Amino acid sequence: MIAVDSSQLQMIDKVVHISRVAKVVKGGRRFSFSAIVVVGDGSGKVGYSLGKANEVPEAIRKGMEAAKRNMVAVPLTASTIPHEVLGKFGASSVILKPASPGTGVIAGGAVRAIMEAAGIHDILTKCVGSRNPHNVVKATVEGLKRLRSVEQVSKTRGKNILEDAPTS
């Protein structure tokens, strides 16, 4: 068995949004930055986090480190997701629909970053409600967490995969 060093694994990291926050103090304004960062391995694992610091690069670095610790597994079927799902967080809802090969990633900024980091190449998405990037990212990850693979559904139903296959 070959030992794989964690530094050799290629992680895909995307900065979704950077906010400049001003704190008013006696001498004027103090600026700090917060960055929403998405990290994935490109083959079904993705995580997100918010990094805060006084400089933008430091905020991004902190966000990437925290996102690597908060990764979740996403069941994939070829290059898409196994079934349609709705993710909700706050006032944001994200609809995720599987797509046929060659469709591509039909998604907006925050959702697109998560899909590319997770390694999903064919998907249809729609954001409903609030477009706030914080809530959209959280709603998308919530939807991905709710996905179940064919094996998981078959096990729950107490049948084997061949019995569950649709007849057409």
Image: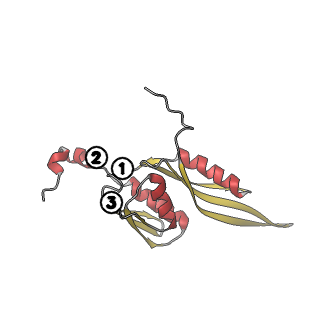
x, y percentage for residue 100? 31, 62
Q: Which residue is disc 2 drawn over?
A: 152
Residue at position x 48%, y 47% from top?
A: 41
Mark 2, Cα crowd under 10 Å, few <14 / some 14-19 / many 20+, is: few
x, y percentage for residue 134? 55, 63
Residue at position x 37%, y 60% from top?
A: 122
Q: Look at the picture and state if 136 lies above or below 69.
A: below
The reply to whether the C-beta atoms of the residues labelled 2 and 1 are less than 8 Å apart is yes
Amino acid of disc 1: Pro
* Quarter containing the C terminus: bottom left
Q: Image quadrant of residue 151?
A: top left
Amino acid of disc 2: Gln
Identify the element where label 2 is drawn: helix
The mark lying in front, picked from 2 and 1, is: 1
Q: Look at the picture and state if 44 lies above or below 108.
A: above
Q: Image quadrant of residue 115?
A: bottom left
Q: Which residue is disc 1 drawn over?
A: 75
Find the distance from the CA under tag 3 to the CA under tag 2: 23 Å
Going from N to C along the chain, the mark reached first, 1 or 3, is: 1
Residue closest to the far left: 167
x, y percentage for residue 10? 53, 44
The mark lying in front, picked from 1 and 3, is: 3
Residue at position x 63%, y 63% from top?
A: 18
* Left or right of 98, for residue 32: right
Colouring: secondary structure
* Left or right of 76, for residue 31: right
The reply to whether the C-beta atoms of the residues labelled 3 and 2 are less than 8 Å apart is no
Going from N to C along the chain, the mark reached first, 2 or 1, is: 1
Residue closest to the far bottom: 129
Find the distance from the CA under tag 2 to the CA under tag 1: 10 Å
The disc placed on residue 101 is 3
Amino acid of disc 3: Pro
